[in-house]
Image: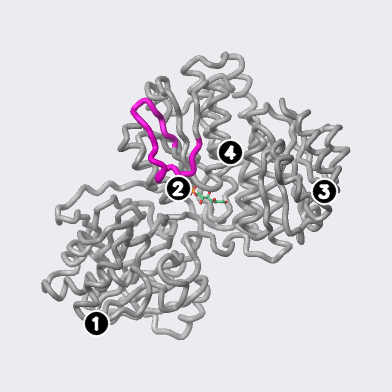
Amino acid sequence: MCGIVGYVGDGNVYDILIKGLHRLEYRGYDSAGIALGTPSGKINIYKSQGKVSNLEDFCKDKNLEATSGIAHTRWATHGEPSDTNAHPHFSEDGNLALVHNGTIENYKVLKDALIQHGCTFHSETDTEVLVQLIEYIKLKNDCSLLDAVRMALKQVVGAYAIAVIEKNHPDKIIAARNSSPLAVGIGNNEMFLASDATPFVEYTNECVYLKDGEIAIIEKGEPLKIVNLDNRETQIDVTTLELSISQLEKGGYEHFMLKEIFEQPTTLRDCIRGRVIEGGKKIMLSGVIDGKEKFLNAKRIVIVACGTSWHAALLGKYLIQDMCKIPVEVEYASEFRYSNPILDEKDVVIAISQSGETADTLAAVKIARNMGAYVYGISNVVGSSIPRETESGTYIHVGPEIGVASTKAFTGQVMVLTLLALSIAQLKGTMTLEKISWLGEHILKIPSTVEKVLALNDKIERLSMKYTYAKNCLYLGRGFSYPVALEGALKLKEISYIHAEGYPAAEMKHGPIALIDEEMPSVIIAPKDHVYEKIVSNVQQVKARGGSIIAIVNEGDEIISKMADHVLEVPEMPECLTPIITSIPLQLLSYYIAINKGKDVDMPRNLAKSVTVE
Ligand code: F6R
């Protein structure tokens, strides 16, 4: 997965592209490059391995004059991260430069055919095949770049968002998409192109999200034109962006991750706003109202997601089964898509994805729709692919999440799943009005409760020192706290590179207990709930083997607090709402441990924010 930026206009092309690449660095950061179309009819390409800042250093003494340009921040799929494999790629004769996000599945067949025709390849990427193919078709048919792109894309199998510039037309970009996102920003006498709207939000709020199979012709002084692969003009739907610049900056925090953890009272307020009404008595989720009949008649709900979103999905299962009495299955989207799933029109499939672009989740959505299931999406990024491919859905409204480790999106997803379960229960009558209204009242208190939990920050920072050099760590929880344990362990491993495992606490005695000794700390999530007594005995078992314990308990806890080495107390909440509260100390703990180890928490090694390849 990679990020693309493009610009045509009178502004400072280089500055706009570099700033845009920084905004998209969450999509990949193993190499970056820029192609500048000069007024004299040249294309200058500069590339550098590593983060966008390396590219900036490399460009310091270069000629940066340009009227248009395309740029790319890469996450390697075909070919290792290197200067050569970085985008943009030139065509053989240097007439075209191209950037690409996605994977070309039939690149080998195309490459072999082009080699037969005399093309030489310099990189190991599938992208170079695209640019060579377009140039080959252009020369062979003596046609325009647009026609060559159309003809080339008809031969391509796979996912792509591309942008191409041509030496002789430095004021024009041709861009196209299939399964990888691409947005065009329409400014005043200037146009932008990017994998999402964040690179151009400070210049314009007019945005067009390209659809699969569309090609945009972005030309200085001309209105935006969009055609399909058969060159028929398609309708242009302009969206007004509601993003603000302050949402994209660190706002005084050292890292996006910390900012995003501290934003949670606000993001949860935004997520709840207008959805819990009449003081908590009524839950209104428009997506559920749209799909009312489907939810009422669902014989089963299948939730598909990846990573952190999968942990939220697991909580969704507990919530929906408990409140709505509908059987729920939770699947990793990557497994689901290859498991010959059995679905029909009586099934509801819920796809959860912060980015709305995760390739496996998107593929699962398409499979479910083809099999006749009703598909509902829970996403954060407005206009992304999953919300557009699903029949109805809900945005979590937590604002852009830039830190690679998901924090505020997780709590937003859990919040939306809670509201979803409550609104279905309300429609089905599977819960009493008193219970709904009691939970509704508590939901309204969640943002202020999260503020109280964040006051643990300094204590957690001090505590983190003691565990910075742990080699392994176990996270244990039962019931609603089990997915929280999984999520806590994922947070620790992805940003601090400490091996961590989340486990249902009772399962510990079937294996993991063998690992416990003085070197193996356990984080135990034990709020006062219906399995509290059970987890007390799990704590005793860890203690008896000399393991040190960090316990997340409710204020006033007297039993586990006495046994644990360190205690983090959080306010009590109804059981089904505790995951939002108990996950926050775990986010802070991983953050500080990673910081103590000097790790780059916002861009951990080998990880990217949205995984748009298989
Ligand atoms: C972990 C993390 C990932 C994502 C996963 C799915 O902190 O962020 O595990 O949750 O890649 O991404 P989305 O939700 O965008 O589909």
Q: Is residue 344 magenta?
A: yes
The amino acid type of the residue labelled 2 equals Ser
The amino acid type of the residue labelled 3 equals Gly
Look at the numbered discs 3 and 4 and tell me whether their residues touch, using CB distance below 8 Å: no
Mark 4 or 2, nearer chain start: 4
Between tags 1 and 4, which lies in front?
Answer: 1
**Percent from the top left, x then y, of residue 442?**
64, 26
Please, is residue 191 above or below residue 44 in the view? Answer: above
Kind of element beneath mark 2:
helix
Label 4 crowd (10 A; few <14 / some 14-19 / many >=20): many
Kind of element beneath mark 1:
loop
Q: CA distance from mark 3 to mark 1?
A: 65 Å
Please, is residue 12 above or below residue 92 in the view? Answer: above
The amino acid type of the residue labelled 4 equals Leu
Between tags 3 and 4, which lies in front?
Answer: 3
Residue stretch rendered in magenta on the structure: 330-350
Instruction: Please give the residue where the numbered disc 4 appears in the rendered image.
Output: 268
Instruction: Please give the residue where the numbered disc 1 appears in the rendered image.
Output: 93
Look at the numbered discs 2 and 3 and tell me whether their residues touch, using CB distance below 8 Å: no
Q: CA distance from mark 2 to mark 3?
A: 35 Å
Q: CA distance from mark 1 to mark 4?
A: 53 Å
Instruction: Please give the residue where the numbered disc 2 appears in the rendered image.
Output: 334
Q: CA distance from mark 3 to mark 4?
A: 35 Å
